[in-house]
Image (cartoon, rainbow, N blue to C red):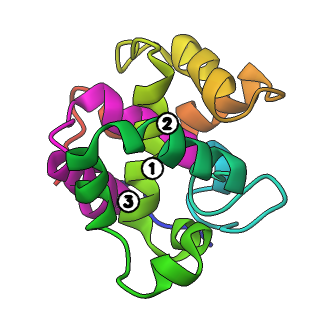
Amino acid sequence: MGIAASELCSYVIRPTLLYLDRYNQAAEAFLLGVAACQSALGAELDSQRGHGLYSIADAQHRRLWDEYLALDPDLASLVRGLASQHAFLTGPDMELTVNLRYATAIAWLMIEASQISLPHADDSLAMAQMWREIFQPEGQLQYFTSAWQTWVSPLFQPSAAIS
């Protein structure tokens, strides 16, 4: 069993994006879509593909730190502030599995580092293409769009309100 989509947005994704000063509705919707595809909203937090809600591989995680965060010490410090004090030092990749806000920050920064423009929140096909480019190169677009229709779209309809 995973995490309720509305609660994942309210208690993990939105607060993390606000903490990073990166919040917008399209970013929130995209991260929810990625979590739906990669881990069934947390039902599978550790797989051969990677760790956590977003199934981030060890190599992706380290590459983000080495090639992106290392170039921005203030941002690196902000992200490091989300990690557990001791656990991060002994098993930084495990933070992706056990620390939802840290995993969300890393997932967002992978998106940011890709320099791909974020599509509008209602463009599920463009979101699917972005997911495949950044998170799942072998992924099928239909898998993302199906997860999008099931989990993301209901939350981001004009009549839906996420508290």
Viewer-proximal residue, 110 or 104?
Answer: 110
| Amino acid type shown at disc 2 | Met
Per the image, the residue denoted by label 2 is 110
Reply above or below: 40 against 144: below
- The residues bearing labels 2 and 1 have C-alpha atoms spaced at a distance of 6 Å
SS of the residue under disc 1:
helix
Please give the name of the residue rendered at 32% of the width and 52% of the height, measured from the top-left corner: 13
Q: Are marks 2 and 1 in contact (CB under 8 Å)?
A: yes
Dominant SS in magenta: helix
Is residue 90 visible to the viewer in this orientation of the structure?
yes
Q: Which residues are magenta?
A: 7-36
Viewer-proximal residue, 125 or 73?
Answer: 73
Could you say which disc has been placed on residue 152 in the image? none
Please give the name of the residue rendered at 55% of the width and 31% of the height, measured from the top-left corner: 149
25 left or right of 42 in image: left
Q: Quadrant of the C terminus?
A: bottom left
- Image location (x, y in percent) of residue 81: 26, 67
Viewer-proximal residue, 74 or 157?
Answer: 74
Quadrant of res 97:
bottom right
- The residues bearing labels 1 and 3 have C-alpha atoms spaced at a distance of 16 Å
Tell me which numbered mark, 1 or 3, is placed earlier along the sequence: 3
In the image, which is nearer the foreground, mark 3 or mark 2? 2
60 left or right of 11 in image: right
Q: Are marks 3 and 2 in contact (CB under 8 Å)?
A: no
Per the image, the residue denoted by label 3 is 8
| Amino acid type shown at disc 1 | Ile
Is residue 151 visible to the viewer in this orientation of the structure?
no
Per the image, the residue denoted by label 1 is 106
